[in-house]
Every structure is written in structure tokens, then in C-alpha cells.
Amino acid sequence: MLSKIIDRVNAENPDLIVFSGDLVTTHPDEIRPFVNELKRLKANDGIVSVMGNHDYCPYNSWTSDSQQQAATDKVRESERRIGWNLLDNSNISLVRRSPDGNSDDILSVIGVENISAMKQFESHGDLKKAMSGAEGQFKILVSHDPTHWRVEVLGKTDIGLMLSGHTHNAQLRLLGLEPSRLVFKENSGLYTEDTVNGRQYLYVNNGLGTTLFPARIGVKAEITVFTLRHAE
């Protein structure tokens, strides 16, 4: 299944691949069987990723905090070994010539460690640190938990687009009803609001895997393709 997913992603010939967190469910060793497949992902500007709440491996019976920290460090190490650019409260710049050919357009891609408005989920991110030096005319934030958008991004920054995951849309949609809406105000798909900083967008991807129960009922696994165009 993963091999087919990677083939479909690569077939898009993407400029940039964004992974918005939760590579594992409970343990870093889950990555090991899939390393060679994940290395096949290709994008002209590389692959960026961030840490999701599961990537801190809190849902396991560790004997000490240091053991959990070692597991978290192993997840980070694995992502870098695969060849991903893990944005732990940092950013990169993508440069393109503007349509008139007289200047460069700069796109800032910012990544934070997990930040959640819900106390039951890990929060380690530092948005201020992540945005330091990000001077692109357009800014994209990769932040795993969509609740972060209203807490710290919407109307408080000039970030044009935030990309999230986390919810899986509860892997359940029946007769148009989405139980995840009872928990998440922004649970799936595209959201937009006009603020003092202009129009800001959030996209919540439904994810590719499963958690809690190994099924998806009415919620398909998702690869999202974004095409960004110059305003002119």
C-alpha cells in the first residue's frame, strides 16, 4: 500500500513534499520496515516534515522520561536518515523568479514542533523561533494540530496558509455526519477567514494511516496537491 502511495505522490512531480506529522503511533521502531520505501519520495525542493503528537511516543509504557526522550530522538533521527528536512521550529526559503523576470519571489516554509490547544496532547513548539528570519512574501506554516491556527496564527501573524493533519477526521463519516466536529472546530479540509493581516487559510489533511482502530469508514486516505500561483 505504501509503495503505491509513494508512486502516486512522485507521479505529481512535486516541487515540495510536506509531511505534517505522526510518522509513528507508539514506537520509533515502527519506521524501520518502511525506510527504503520512504526514501523513494522525490521532490525538486525536497521534503519537509514536522513532529506530531504521536512522534513524541507518549502512548507507551516507558520506565522513565529519559527513555521516552530517547524514543523521540530516534524518530527525529529516522526522519533525517530518510532524507527529510525536519523543521523543528525553523524555516526554509524557496526562491522563484517573479512573472516579470525582474525580481525574486520568496516563499517561506515554516515548521513547528507540535502545538495544541488541548491539554491531552503534547505541546513543544515555538512559533516565534520558527518564524525568525522568515521574510518570504508568502508564508506557509506546517503545524500538526489544527487547533494551533486559532490560538496563535489567525489574525496574529502574516502566515497565509497553515497545513495540518492530526484529526484523521476520526476515520469516520456516516450520512454526512462527522463525529470529529464535536472535538475540532476545523476537522477536515479547507478553512479561510479574512483578518487584519489579509485572508488566511488552513488546510486539514485526513491523513493516510489509522489510529485507535484499523479502518476508515467514509473517510478516504488523502494526498493533497496544492498549486500556488502568483497573485498577478
Image (cartoon, rainbow, N blue to C red):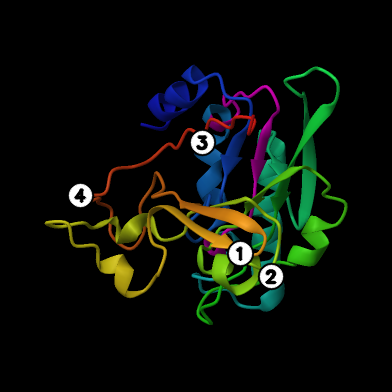
- Find disc 1 in the rendering and name its residue: 56
How far apart are the two marked residues, 4 and 2, measured between alpha carbons? 32 Å
Q: Amino acid at mark 2?
A: His
Residue range (magenta):
38-54
Front in this rendered view, residue 227 or 181: 227
Spatial CA distance of label 2 from label 3 is 26 Å
The magenta stretch spans residue 43:
yes
Q: Nearer the viewer, residue 195 or 144?
A: 195
Mark linked to residue 87:
none
- According to the image, label 2 marks what residue? 124
Residue 32: x and y, percent?
56, 41
- Mark 1 and mark 4 lie on one chain; the one further toward the N terminus is 1
* Magenta-colored segment: predominant secondary structure: loop
Residue at 42%, 32% in the rendered image:
2
CA–CA distance in space, label 2 to label 1: 10 Å
Q: Which residue is mark 4?
A: 218
Mark 4 or 2 closer to N-term?
Answer: 2
The quadrant the C terminus occupies is: top right
- Residue 160, position as x, y percentages in the image: 63, 50
Point out the tag, 2 or 1, that comes first from the N-terminus.
1
Q: Residues within 10 Å of mark 4 (few under 14, many from 20)?
A: some
At label 1, counting other C-alpha atoms closer than 10 Å, the crowd grade (few under 14, some 14-19, many 20 or more) is: many
